[in-house]
Amino acid sequence: MLYWFLKGVAAFLSFFLFRFRATGLDNIPQKGGVIICSNHAHSYDPIFIAYVARRRLRFLAKKELFTGKLASWFFRALGAIPVDRDITDMVAYNTAIKVLQNGEALLLFSQGHRRKTIDIHDTKSGAAFFAIKAQVPIVPVGVVSSYKFFTRVRIRIGKPINLEKYKGQRLKTALLQEITENTMRQIVQLTAQK
């Protein structure tokens, strides 16, 4: 309930503060588990993507945001999954896989932290890992904006990347990195489109 209320508020404010142009919206499946994987240059990115998406998105968030009862309730109500970035957080990993297996959409940023540019070789392979484990597609998304009020926000959504051929394979680091880099190349192409 809180998610949709805040999405409505964000939609109202965004309508006046930014000029949106979203393409490829039909590439996000409306049913079933799916990973939305995007570049991440600004803290507005998850809001922008949630604004244009036609379904609810879950997302991983650093555990530091969940400090205190109110903050913890707020982010959990939004669908956030706390993750400890200093360790291999298996609780967060297992929760993310269950979310996908339950047919929900999970928003991930393979760059991890916010970065102005995309380095396809300096990324985290969580999206590839989750997609193969949960047997769901990855949808690449490119966000382009100056992030200044009253300017254009371009969100380009690419075709789903199907990873069924990897089902049952051993998830070696090199394989996960290859899939991740391929996904990031597609995101680079989406951000470069005119």
Image (tube, grey):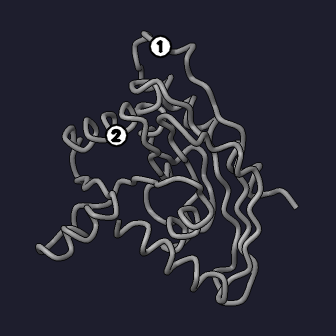
Answer above or below: position of 33 versus 140. Answer: above
Residue extending furthest front?
1
Question: Which label number is shown at residue 167?
Answer: 1
Rendered residue at 74%/67% (across/down): 154
Given the image, on which type of amino acid does mark 1 rest? Lys
- Residue 32: where, in percent of width, then height? 49, 34
Q: Residues within 10 Å of mark 2 (few under 14, many from 20)?
A: some
Name the N-terminal-most of marks 1 and 2: 2
Q: Secondary structure at mark 2?
A: helix
Residue that mark 2 sits on:
99
Q: Nearer the viewer, mark 1 or mark 2?
A: 2
- The residue furthest right is 194
Q: Nearer the viewer, residue 135 or 110?
A: 135
The picture places residue 156, in percent across and down from the top left corner, at: 73, 56
Q: Nearer the viewer, residue 41 or 140?
A: 140
Q: Position of residue 101 (x, y in %)?
A: 37, 30
- The residues tagged by marks 1 and 2 sit, at their Cα atoms, a distance apart of 19 Å
Q: Is residue 7 left or right of residue 92?
A: right
* x 69%, y 42%: residue: 27
How far across and how far down the image is residue 84, in percent? 22, 53
Q: Could you tell me if the residues under marks 1 and 2 are in contact, i.e. CB atoms within 8 Å?
A: no
Image quarter (top left, top right, bottom left or bottom right) of the C terminus = bottom right
| Residue shown at the point (47%, 55%) measured from the top left | 56
Residue 175, placed above or below residue 7: above
- Which mark is drawn over residue 41? none
The answer to which quarter of the image holds residue 70 is bottom left
Q: Secondary structure at mark 1?
A: loop
